[in-house]
Amino acid sequence: MLLGVTEREIEKYKRIKRHDILGITVGQLIDGLNSFYSDFRNKRIRLGTAIYIVKKQIEVSPPEEVNTIINHLRKNPKHDHYTFFTLMKYQDKSGNERQVIFP
């Protein structure tokens, strides 16, 4: 416990922070969502999850990481990003194996 804050509360904060869109303009969000949903393969992916993906793109996450998550979501469009995490592996542009946890 840190200053009266439990580990559970810290984890809850971290999960909320992952979905925080402060610092992203409405224009960025709209353009990103329009671009994301312009691909017919993304039409079944839930809005909250799409916002998470757009945020990662705006924050300049590695494209290989974002594409790994998008490909997972296309196969599992109703993945509930609020209840469980998924560990995925991908190769970065240098060919090194990396891991990403969604969300």
Image: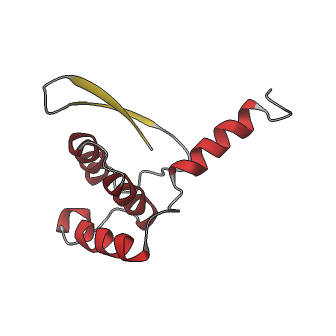
- Where residue 12 sits, quadrant-wise, is top right
**Residue 49: percent from the left, percent from the top?**
42, 58
In the displayed structure, would residue 8 be above or below residue 23?
above
Q: What residue is drawn where x is 18% and y is 67%?
A: 39
Which quarter of the picture shows residue 8?
top right
* Number of marks: 0
Percent x, y of residue 98:
28, 26
Picture coordinates of residue 80, whole percent (x, y): 48, 52
Answer with the quarter of the image where residue 54 lies.
bottom left
Color scheme of the displayed model = secondary structure
Q: Nearer the viewer, residue 83 or 28?
A: 28
- Whether 10 is drawn above or below 41: the answer is above
Vertical arrangement, residue 7 with respect to residue 66, above or below = above
Q: Residue furthest right?
A: 4
- The residue at the far left in this view is 94
Quarter of the image with the C terminus in it: top left
Q: Residue at x 65, y 37 (%)?
A: 11
**Is residue 66 left or right of 29 when viewed as pictured?**
left
Q: Quick one: which residue is furthest to the top in this view?
A: 96
- The residue drawn where x is 30% and y is 68% is 32
Q: Residue at x 48, y 38 (%)?
A: 85
The percent position of residue 36, horizontal first and vertical second, equals 26, 66
